Image: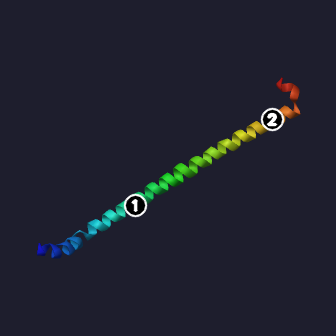
Amino acid sequence: MPGDVFFWPGCVIFFLPVIIRCLFLFLFLFLFLFLFLFLFLFLFLFLFLFLFLFLFLFLFLFLFILLLIFPDRFR
């Protein structure tokens, strides 16, 4: 209908604050979820994973050095 062409800019102007709020809401949720998932899950979990790996590596290295120094103690 001919009136529909003139209706949709008014509809956009009327719903512009709602559209802006929805955009900011989705932007905030996306940034929050992205930062939470990326920073917490990936960085902290990989940090703890590498920390435990290096801890066990140094522990086994220490035990291996002890085995080399005192071979008769571990028989």
Q: Residue at x 29, y 66 (%)?
A: 19
Residue 43 x, y percent position in the rendering: 57, 52
Q: Which residue is mark 1?
A: 28
Query: In this figure, which residue is indicated by the disc labeled 2?
Result: 64
Label 1, label 2: how far apart the Cα atoms are: 52 Å
Image quadrant of residue 15? bottom left
Comparing labels 1 and 2, the label whose residue is closer to the camera: 2
Q: Position of residue 25 (x, y in %)?
A: 35, 61
Which secondary structure, mark 1? Answer: helix
Quarter of the picture holding the N terminus: bottom left
Q: From what the image shows, is residue 70 above or below residue 61?
A: above
Type of amino acid under label 1: Phe
Residue at 26% across, 70% down: 16
Q: Quadrant of the C terminus?
A: top right
Kindly identify which numbered label has been placed on residue 13: none
User: Is 2 left or right of 38, judged from the image as shown?
Assistant: left
Q: Position of residue 55 (x, y in %)?
A: 70, 41
In front: 23, or 7?
Answer: 7
Q: Residue at x 31, y 68 (%)?
A: 20
Establish if 10 lies above or below 32.
below
Badge 2 amino acid = Phe
